Image (cartoon, rainbow, N blue to C red):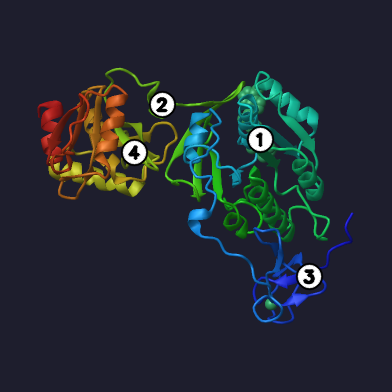
Amino acid sequence: MSPKAKTVYRCTNCGADHPKWAGRCDACGEWNTLVEEMATRATTSASGRRISGQKSMAEGGSVAPTVRLRDVKSSQGRRLKTGIKEFDFVLGGGIVPGSMVLVGGEPGIGKSTLLLQVAGKLEELGHSTLYVSGEESALQVKLRAERLHGSAENVSLLNETLLETILATAGSERLDAIVVDSIQTVFTSDLEGAPGNVGQVRECAARLMRFAKETETTVFAVGHVTKGGGIAGPKTLEHIVDTVLYFEGEGMLEHRILRATKNRFGSVDEIGVFRMTEEGLIAVENPSELFLGDRLNNSSGSAVTALLEGSRPVLIEIQGLATKTGYGTAQRVSTGYDGRRLALLLAVLDKRAGLSFSQFDVFLNVVGGVRMQEPAGDLAVASALASSIYDRPVANSAIFLGEVGLGGEIRPVSQAERRLGEAAKMGMTVAYMSERGIPKRGSRGLEVVGVRTINDLFRHLFQT
Ligand SMILES: Nc1ncnc2c1ncn2[C@@H]1O[C@H](COP(=O)(O)OP(=O)(O)OP(=O)(O)O)[C@@H](O)[C@H]1O
Ligand SMILES: [Mg+2]
Ligand SMILES: [Zn+2]
């Protein structure tokens, strides 16, 4: 073992060094700002020479070679596919060798399951993968692998939390990927702090990142999420790594959504939808089907719209129910849609289309636990409510796209072409949308009906 490296406690506010930890920085007076780090933040240059990160300018800095960009070996385009399409998609088309990917998510959401499945797939495709578990015993990981029907049984497992051992082990064989589950359990013996503290997490992440770059190994690190929704530990963690993925669930549902919030190698707009099952995570290739699966045929008070999740359109059903108010004031209950927006739409329906809801309790539900934030869904909400009050269903295969203005006018939506494309793919046959927003290019067998106002629309729908 190398002699213990010297560490200092640096103030994150003013940068002053302290030999010992203290609650308060005596240079600037801030509380709880001291974070342990290595005394000399030495970095290794690409040529393997050590250059000092701090005093290189004036005192004894050495000259490092430069390289023309055209001579830089490019691994661009070389991406490993995991075969889990949704996962590759979110990463921007597969795993980039030498990148570091942080996977965050709430406790129990399925981070370990996802990465064990990814490791299993990589191994299956001949890419050697090491799974480092600092959180669970080998037996626990094996039990999970059994749930996955043995698809991960060729993955090598290392039960270790000491970073030095992890890096030495990983460096002793040619690996394509390692999974570190989780970054909060790993620690370096160079720092005194306990695993999970800011200094430890930051230093371990930085060294794993360096390992990834130097060995062209992809490092996946699991990160726990705090109550605030960020990944526990320093915010700088997200700056250090190349890609940050969040794995999220929607309430009680079995759906899991994987989304990139940072990606040096791709767009951050894409999402992947999975279902958590007894056999592990199953990619949902057609999220809309999942969301629309249980739709009743021809019942009144239901209308479909296409919302954008990132750049990906997802079909969503809106249900409206208007029932005669018994006593007192009429109720307005809205799930997944802003209550004030609902009140506004009801007023517009009253004033511009002569549909009065004053004697009705109104219930509105965006199906699937989705929170609708885009105004593009207004038209579907208005149609569902009108359908309920007329007690006349709208066609099951109709989709509604549009923002409704105070004058009852219907406004175009962004990325209409994408939404129409998804609707057509899902078997929708007719789309109602703002006349002005109809894309020039046709939409694959979908009939597009342009409407100017909600009155226009209701005339089409209910022959009013
Ligand atoms: N037999 C099963 N059938 C269906 N789902 C299961 C089954 N066993 C476990 N799960 C699901 O897997 C989840 C746990 O997955 P996993 O351990 O991968 O999550 P994690 O995000 O790594 O959690 P942690 O934060 O504890 O590390 C459970 O919350 C549960 O939803
Ligand atoms: Mg886990
Ligand atoms: Zn200070």
For the residues labelled 2 and 4, the Cα–Cα distance comes to: 14 Å
The amino acid pointed to by label 3 is: Val
For disc 1, the marked residue is 112
> Residue 293 got which mark?
none
Mark 2 belongs to which amino acid? Asn
* Amino acid beneath label 4: Leu
Drawn side of residue 207 relative to residue 273, left or right:
right
Disc 3 on helix, strand or loop? strand
Label 2, residues with CA under 10 Å away: few <14, some 14-19, many ≥20: some
Please count the marks in the image: 4
Whole-Å distance between the Cαs marked 1 and 2?
A: 24 Å
Which residue is tagged 3? 8
Residue labelled with disc 4: 307
Query: Which is more N-terminal, label 4 or label 3?
Result: 3
Q: Is residue 316 above or below residue 12?
A: above
The location of residue 21, given as percent across then percent down, is 80, 70
Give the mark nearer the N terminus: 2 vs 4: 2
Query: Where is mark 2, residue-wise?
Result: 286
